[in-house]
Amino acid sequence: MIRPQPLQPGDCVAIVSPAGAVKEPEIVTGAVATLSSWGLRAVVAPHALARDGYYAGTIEQRTADLRAMLRDDSIKAILCSYGGYGCMHLLPHFCSDIANHPKWIIGMSDCTALLAATLSQGVISLHSPQCRHLSENGKSASSEHLKEILFGRMPHYQTAPNCLNRTGEATGVVTGGNLSLITALAGTPYDMVKPGSILFIEEINEPAYKIERMLYTLKLSGALGSLKALIVGCLADCKENLALGGTIHEIIRHMTEEYGYPVSLDFPVGHGNGNYPMPVGATATIKIKNDGVELSYTVV
């Protein structure tokens, strides 16, 4: 895997909108201010604030922005402004640019699709807070972790225990993101679930039965059983349904019981105030103990 070069003070970060239209332009200007406070310059792509129906421009406009920012050697990282829906439209059109111009691609939620494409090209990317978080919480722990990673320091996280965690230790390539996108891309050239990997998942506004169904898709394909460890992040506004046999966390614990690998629940990643950046495609070691969880990325 290729790890993009660390940024230096004065380097330029491009902001793109590969999916839904940005409804509040101030989150982009706020993110620019946060990047500036880190000593970085920011450029807003030509169509980052565009609108074409639901989307931030047509497929051609969104693709053109992304490809231009990848091909521009003065741009050292690309930050996605917003998720929503639409990144899958772009996947067939820019993968060669990622391979030829590896740089940090930063995003989450629907932008998991871009991280999947980047992974398919052997390049490490960042599942991370996007413009809203950087604008409104620029000094949060998650934002500070992003800054450290961009400037070359791979993360070491320590988080609180969960009574349903399965203890253990594992080392593997970390992959993952939004569960809906992970399952939507299963069986395609952008399939993110690799045997022997540490998979992290997060979700927003999905009922319990849909989360269980998506996980069963991974289970029936053999992907869920091929992991070294599973990290379950924030399940924001995901409605519980105890008639399914337990809470979502209890269902996940039961579904993975036969595999015996370590499972961490409530890890601070996803649509929540705690959204620790996760280098996708990098190797890490996870240690899950009764008194807490450690996730340490390998320095390469």
Image: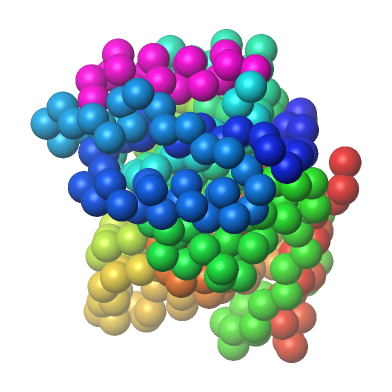
Q: In the image, 91: left or right of 276? A: left
The quarter of the picture where residue 208 lies is bottom left
Q: In the image, 68: left or right of 284? A: left
Residue 221 in the image, given as x and y percentages of width and height:
49, 40
In magenta stretch: residue 62 = yes
Residue 119 in the image, given as x and y percentages of width and height:
62, 31
Image quadrant containing the N terminus: top right
Question: Visible in this render: residue 50?
Answer: yes
Question: Visible in this render: residue 209?
Answer: no
Q: Say which of 258 and 139 sits in front.
A: 139
Q: Say which of 41 and 48 sits in front.
A: 41
**Vertical relation: 86 (above or below) 199:** above
Q: Residue drawn at (73%, 68%), measured in percent from left and top?
A: 157
Q: In the image, 85: left or right of 260? A: left
Image quadrant containing the C terminus: top right
Outermost residue on the right side: it is 300
Q: In the image, 161: left or right of 252? A: right
**Vertical relation: 238 (above or below) 291:** above
Q: Residue drawn at (36%, 68%), measured in percent from left and top?
A: 236
Q: Which residues are magenta?
A: 57-73
How many numbered dots are placed on residues in this image?
0
Colour mode of the rendering: rainbow
Residue 294 in the image, given as x and y percentages of width and height:
76, 71
Q: Which is the main secondary structure of the residues drawn in magenta?
A: helix
Q: Residue drawn at (23%, 25%), measured in percent from left and top?
A: 57
Q: Residue drawn at (15%, 27%), measured in percent from left and top?
A: 52
Q: Say which of 143 and 84 sits in front.
A: 143
In magenta stretch: residue 95 = no
**Vertical relation: 154 (above or below) 17:** below
Outermost residue on the left side: it is 53
Residue 28 in the image, given as x and y percentages of width and height:
37, 46
The quarter of the picture where residue 40 lies is top right
